[in-house]
Amino acid sequence: MFPAAGQRARSQLCSENDSNFRGPSNVTKSSLVRISCTCLDPCVSKPRSEPITEQQLSGWTLLERFIGVLDHHGSLIAPNRREEHGLRDLDRRTYFGLFLFGLFNPVVTSMRALCAASRLDRVSGMLDLQGPVAISGFSDAQHVFAPEILEPVLRELLARSLARETGPFKSGRVSPEIIRIFDSTVWKVVTRMKWAEWRHQHCKQNAVRLHVKLRLTDEQPEDFRVTEGKICERAAMRQMLKPGEFYLGDRNYGADFALFHELDEMDCGYVLRLRNEVKWEVIENHPLSPEAVAKGITLDATVRLGHRGGGGLRRVVVFKGPEMKEELILVTSESPDELSALEVIGLYHHRWKVEMFFRWLKCLVPCRHWFAESKEGVMIQIYLCLIKGLLLAELTGTKPNKRMMELLQWHQMGELSDGQLAKGLAAEEAIRARRAAKKKKA
């Protein structure tokens, strides 16, 4: 269905090899040495890269959509003094637009390639470039344009996503609109990004950590923080707390008993996992239903948490499924009258949606190459990655999977017609619907 350039190249190479080696008599020891040297010599074996053409570049329609939203909301953040410098070639519109264009396009794999693409007429015309973008100018722009300029754009697209994706959820008696999931993920980075300190395991390792507060209703981030890898998850969580919300989190968030008191003061509900070595004193056992016992719940009790009771009186639910290696110990702010033990476990299962979000972000919106390496530049790239995901979801009507992303890229590169794209997207959506129905039936 798709003409694969790589396959054609391999076929051509094989035909050339066949013409050179007609039979065993042509193969000598010296010819094998020459072949191995050619394959190992990077100066010989590496093919010369062809110039990028407009037909190879993707993301035109979505880029126009982004520029429209940026033009509408960009004025909410006043420009700084460096941004208004009269000799600067790039403004926020052209910089962010070119940056996002590089993230959309599978052909552009580096900042140098992105600057080279700015020479193309269609790219320069859409972004109103006065001339080719210099590498030094693009690199310097990460220190000029604040990442916060993109925040209203992200908010606008998130609002549209929420209106489109909200649906029924099994969340017990807690409204799904107030449920937020906390977690973080890391990207390993090069050692020259010295601000991104992480750990020392046999050697010094640097990493960028993304802390996310994910909405349950549409599985999109309501807030996030970009920090160096060593920053504690609870410290970032405290910066994103809001009164009246309900939080789900893993054992890293349940390790600090002081956080429970802070959540109580802010009238926030929570279901958080505790570490398995935690100590408590049982104050009152709550009765378990036969269904809860059959599901693997072994304890539902009000306990005095901590070796000396520093965690206060908390409700703890302990669960262990048939294939689990260790118990799942959850602490919750809700009483048995508000949430049953089964509903507490069901709520915590939603926490895995943030893991799926990270997987989707890293696989479908990859940050394998950083176009900017400062903290501000990394924040800009992550902002634009999230914006890219929302634009793709807006285009397809759902969060695109890997196969959908491939179809979109083939279409933007001119290898698929509009009809073939629509047919391919419909087929992928049908496959997704069948899988969801099969999972629900199981």
Image (cartoon, rainbow, N blue to C red):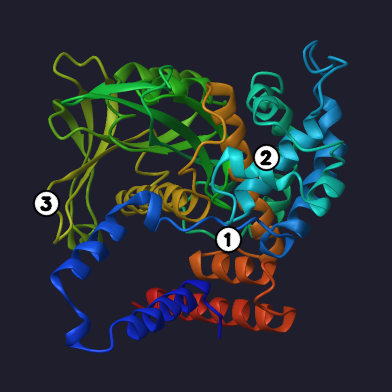
Question: Residue 369 placed where, x, y %?
Answer: 48, 41
Q: Residue at x 63, y 41 (%)?
A: 384
Q: From the viewer's perspective, tell me whether residue 164 is left or right of residue 401.
A: right
* Quadrant in the picture for the C terminus: bottom left
The residue that label 3 is drawn on is: 325
- Count the numbered circles shown: 3
Q: Which residue is mark 1?
A: 399
Q: Which mark is residue 359?
A: none
**Element under disc 3:** loop
Q: Amino acid at mark 2?
A: Cys
Q: Residue at x 42, y 55 (%)?
A: 46
Please give left or right for residue 420 compared with residue 195 in the image.
Answer: right
Q: CA distance from mark 3 to mark 2?
A: 51 Å
Residue 334 in sight here: no
The residue that disc 2 covers is 115
For the residue labelled by badge 2, is the local secondary structure a helix, a strand or a loop? helix
